[in-house]
Image (cartoon, rainbow, N blue to C red):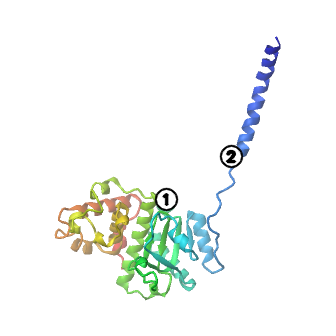
Amino acid sequence: MRNSFLRIIMIGLLPLMLLSMSACHKEKIVATGVPDFYVLPQGNQSYDDSIVAFHKKYGSYILYKFTDRDFKFDYVRNLNAAATVGNLAYVANTLQFIKTQYLNFYTESYLHQTLPFKILLAAAIDTVAANRPNGPLVRSYSGFYATSSMLAIGWTDSTLLQLSPSRFKEIRGYMHQAFAQQAALSGALTIPAEFMKYIPASYTTIDLDMGINGFTTDIRSVPIIERNVAWDFASFVGQITSHTKAELDATILSPSYDKLGLLNAKYNAVIQYYNQQGTDLQAIGELP
C-alpha cells in the first residue's frame, strides 16, 4: 500500500521534474557568441573601418599586422616560405586592388562561401626562403601564397603601383588563382566532377610533356607536396583571368600544346563551374 502511494506521488511529480531538467538544460546551452580570434581594428588608420566592416560582413579577417605563426599556422611540415609585414602606407592601395580586381567580379553568395578565414597583407612573400635562411627575402614571382586557412598577398608596398599594364594583368590572374586555390584547399570550393574526369592518376609521377598531362604550366616548378587538384584547378583560373580567349587558343589550348584535348576539357569545366556561380571568368581575362 505504501509503495503504491509513493508511486502515485512520483508520477505526479514527474512532469515537474522533467520541466525543471529541461529548464536547466536550456540554461546550459544558451549561446554566448563565438569569440574573436583576432582583435580588430589593428590600428587607427583611415582604412581600419573598412576592414572591420569586411569582417562583420564575411567573417574573414584582413590582417596587416601578423606574426610568422599566423603565416605558418596550419602547416604540418617545414614551410619553405616567408613573408614580411606590409607597409602601412600602402594598405589602402592593396585593399582597393582586392576590391576592384577580385571581389567585384563575384556574387555575394560565392564570396560568403569561399573567402579565407584570414587574408594577410604582406610587403613581399619569398617562396624559396629555406634555401637562403641568412639572406634577404626575395619576392616570389606571383607574390601570393595560399594554405587551407590563409591567403597571403605580398604586394602591400610601392611595387604594385609601379607595375606595367601587362604585369598588372598577370598579377590579377595570380590573385584569382590564389583565392581559388585557398578555397579548394579549405574545402569551401568543391572541385566540379566534370573537372575531376580529366585529372591525372598521379601528380607526382608525370610525363615531361605538360600538354599531354593537361597542365597549364610546368608542374615541376611546384613543390611535390603542393601538387594536387587544388593547384591544378586554380592554375586554370589564373590563366583564364590573365589572358584573352584568343591568347589561350594560341597557347595552352592550341592543338600543338593540348595534344590529347585535356586542357580544353578542363578549361570548359572551369568556365561552366563559374558560370553556375554567376561569374563570367573569361570576361575578366578580356579586360586590360
Q: Rounded to the nearest whole Å, what is the CA distance between mark 2 and mark 1?
A: 27 Å
**Residue 71, numbered label:** none
Q: Is residue 280 visible?
A: no
Q: Which residue is mark 1?
A: 113
Per the image, label 1 sits on a secondary structure element best described as helix
Which quadrant of the structure image shows residue 44? bottom right
How far across and down, in percent of the image, does residue 134 sit? 46, 84
Q: At 24% across and 70% down in the image, what residue appears? A: 252
How far across and down, in percent of the image, does residue 98 sit? 48, 74
Judged from this view, the residue extending furthest toward the top is 1
Q: At 37% across and 72% down in the image, what residue appears? A: 284
Q: Which residue is mark 2?
A: 29
Q: Between label 2 and label 1, give the one nearer the viewer.
A: 2
Q: Mark 1, residues whose alpha carbon is within 10 Å: few (<14), some, or many (≥20)? A: few
Front-lying residue, 90 or 50: 90
CB contact under 8 Å: marks 2 and 1: no
Mark 2 residue type: Ile
How far across and down, in percent of the image, does residue 277 sit? 41, 59
Q: Is residue 12 visible?
A: yes
